[in-house]
Amino acid sequence: MSSIQPAQATPSLVIENRWDDVVAARLSAAELLPHRGLGPEKERVGSEVGFVQESNSHSPSDPSSHSKEALRHPPAMPVVNCISDLRELARRRIPRAIFEYADRGSYDEVTFNRNRRDLAALEFRQRVMVDVSKQSLTTTVLGETWTIPVGIGPTGLTGLFHANGEMLGARAAQAYGVPFCLSTMSICSIEDVRSAVTKPFWFQLYLMRDRGFNEELIERAKAAQCSALMLTVDMPIQGLRRRDPKNGLSIPPRLTVRNAIDVAMRPTWAMKVLLGKRRTFGNLAGRMSNTGGLTTLSQWIASQFDPTVTWQDIDWVRSRWPGKLIIKGILDAEDAKLACENAADALVVSNHGGRQLDGAPSTVSVLPEIVDAVGDRCEVLFDGGVQSGQDVLKALALSARGCLIGKTFLYALAAMGEKGVMTALDILRSELQVSLALTGTNDVRQVGRDVLRDPRPGVSVCR
Ligand SMILES: Cc1cc2nc3c(=O)[nH]c(=O)nc-3n(C[C@H](O)[C@H](O)[C@H](O)COP(=O)(O)O)c2cc1C
């Protein structure tokens, strides 16, 4: 149980306190404003993330007044108090090809947009005159305690968003007391992440044609003492994210005539990632030629990922992985039932963040029917569009046990590394806590569908 203190109830205060301690030193005004000197762009970008304006009240005739004023009015600092602030910082700090790899969806982005739109359409019931002075945000998933009902989902290429990104993400998750899931397609390897943390993390697996390689990955995950295996089932073949080939995304990233200016404006990223030690797929060493082009990656995925996978193959995984098994990428009640019948301990309602089947429903719109189909046979996790504590509360209200974040994690990591991820978790925690209180609820484990009003047309919230 935690009592609400003013600093906890106001997200910007949380961040400002943290800011004083850590962020101020890391984000100089120069780093924050790569467009400095470009006139109107500076104004526009500054105001987007809510820069605190500097006072200009010092006397120009007294030179010492500059330094005195500087002490009284330190340089403008951004107030980071929502996930979109982190997204904006990320946009400025990493090259466009990497940013848009995370920020965009597949094809016409219909499903991608639905995820956020349908979450936003749900309305809370505001309840008053309830004692909300003490609250609990802690929950348990698969027998593990989470300090907030939010975990970090698997994302490929994370180490290109920040040097050693997966190691930093896992460290932040460990410090916060939430799970971190490492992708098969990560930049840091399973062993790298193992060396960065002391507590177990999760490993995500794609089934490949070469089952020998899958077996090897499972053995490596066991050796790293991963506490759960997450099998992603919604990518037998890859949907097209149209921006990636247009942006010339390559792995490892390369400096080209086309991206030279973009990269030159992000010297910190260039120094640490472009010239860094870990720049290609850490888990696939020796499995993939290093020719770099995205076409090569797509062709590699097409040639390696197994499009023949069926529910029968779960037996094969089960016979090699005796631990907790999570099936990720369920968007249909029938498939949810089959996942339970095939011995999943948990499933993730997911459409891969709108990056696969365009035209599929939003995850939040199918969550209620999936929860109803599953009953208490396995635990249901949720992802897709979670960018605020309010989003988390809505998913909990529709009976998700917890949420996973994809883009939110990557924005935070790209913006400020490990501290950025901690900041994102802080923001989600703070927003969740306040929203919980204002719906008259005190414990995330007791949130029910009654915190939501009747849905708007187009969003089905089964009752
Ligand atoms: C850049 C990026 C890479 C991803 N890579 C993987 C992956 O390697 N394996 C996987 O199972 N899911 C992957 N996902 C999907 C996420 O795990 C998650 O389902 C999705 O991001 C949730 O939606 P959100 O980004 O709106 O939070 C990726 C998502 C993004 C944005």
Image (cartoon, helix red, strand yellow):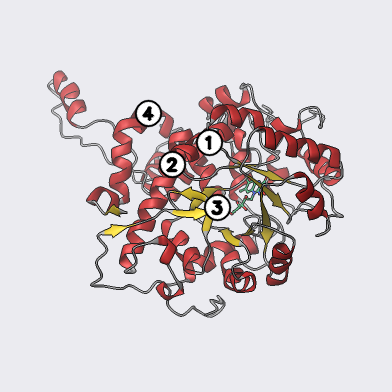
Badge nearest the viewer, 2 or 1: 1
Residue 28, numbered label: 4
Q: CA distance from mark 2 to mark 1?
A: 12 Å
Q: CA distance from mark 4 to mark 3?
A: 31 Å
Among numbered discs 4 and 3, the one appearing first in the sequence: 4
Task: Please tell me which of labels 2 and 1 falls first in the chain.
Answer: 2
Which of discs 4 and 3 lies nearer the camera? The answer is 3
Where residue 132 appears, as percent x and y from the top left, is 27, 63
Question: Hey, what amino acid is under mark 1?
Answer: Lys
* Label 4 beta carbon within 8 A of ligand 1: no
Name which residue lies at 67% across and 55% down. 328
Lower sequence index among marks 3 and 1: 1
Q: Return the residue at label 2.
A: 176
Q: Position of residue 228 (x, y in %)?
A: 63, 46
> Is residue 137 toward the left or the right of residue 141 in the image?
left
Question: Is there CB contact under 8 Å for labels 3 and 1?
Answer: no
Identity, as a three-letter code, of the amino acid under mark 4:
Ser
- 424 or 108: nearer the viewer: 424
The kind of residue tagged 3 is Leu
Residue 199 — which label?
1
Q: Do tag 2 and tag 3 residues touch (Cβ < 8 Å)?
A: no
Label 4: element kind: loop
Label of residue 404 in the image: 3
Question: Residue at image x 53%, y 63%?
Answer: 400
Q: Residues within 10 Å of mark 4 (few under 14, many from 20)?
A: few
Cβ of mark 3 under 8 Å from ligand 1: the answer is yes
